[in-house]
Amino acid sequence: MSKIINILLVGVGGQGTILASKILTNVALAQGYEVKMSEIHGMAQRGGSVVTQVRIGEDVHSPVIEPGEADYMVAFEQLEAYRWSHFLKKDGVLIVNTQKIVPLPVLIGAATYPENILVELKGRVEHFINLDGLKLASEAGNVKATNVVLMGVLSKYMDFPEDAWKNALVAGIPAKLLDLNMKAFASGVAEVK
């Protein structure tokens, strides 16, 4: 990998965005790459945005991804995909969990949740993958493993061996939850044809 790969992970507090970025970081480090990671928490404990920027390469100086520079974006929720889609390169890969988490302004009637987000996003990007990660995680044993399902999908687009991903799961997931997370990861991998 001679160039720097930019990955943006976006979601809502409690979805495991940060754990997913740590798994990704561990995979890249294990392959000998330099990694820089930056986290932005917007009232995450109250359902606010959580954005993690991960940059991987041989010589990475900054963790910051500028708009239009992300090679990959993994969105844990539709509205977050919509909010952050301008960070994705024109030929970038957008992976979207179809889950909707209604933000407080919508709940109190001060705003509306945009309609047809997935249709609009599909029209904006060349490489668009959407899936019901919540359902796949539930089938694996726990809805909280949605983040690992999404990492399984991402793994199919990145040039890292599957064993590296599994080793990162072993290192980052408590032993009692490892089996279901391995199933969740495998279900994400299987979603990419």
Image (tube, grey):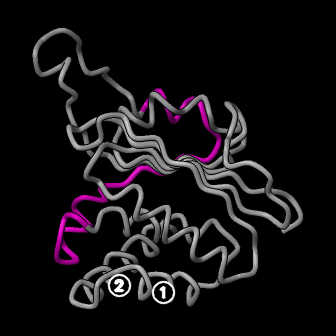
Residue located at (39% from left, 55% from top) = 17
Q: Position of residue 72 (x, y in %)?
A: 62, 51
Q: Position of residue 53 (x, y in %)?
A: 58, 48
Task: Compute the Cα span from label 2 to label 1.
Answer: 7 Å
Asked if 37 appears above or below 141 in the picture, the reply is above
Q: Position of residue 106 (x, y in %)?
A: 18, 19
Residue 81, numbered label: none
- Classified by dominant secondary structure, the portion drawn in magenta counts as helix
Asked if the stretch drawn in magenta spans residue 126, the answer is: yes
Q: Are marks 2 and 1 in contact (CB under 8 Å)?
A: yes
Residue located at (75% from left, 73% from top) = 33
Asked if 113 appears above or below 135 in the picture, the reply is above
Asked if 45 appears above or below 35 in the picture, the reply is above
Report the span colored magenta: 119-144
The quadrant in which residue 101 appears is top left
Q: Position of residue 89 (x, y in %)?
A: 70, 38
Give the SS element for disc 2.
helix
> Front-most of 48 and 159?
48
Residue located at (67% from left, 42% from top) = 64
Q: Is residue 147 left or right of residue 61?
A: left
Query: Which class describes the residues within 10 Å of circle 2: few (<14), some (14-19), or many (20+)?
Result: many
The quadrant in which residue 3 appears is bottom right
Three-letter amino acid code at the position of disc 2: Met
The residue tagged 2 is: 182
Q: Is residue 121 left or right of residue 64?
A: left
Three-letter amino acid code at the position of disc 1: Lys
Q: Earlier in the sequence, mark 2 or mark 1?
A: 1
The residue tagged 1 is: 166
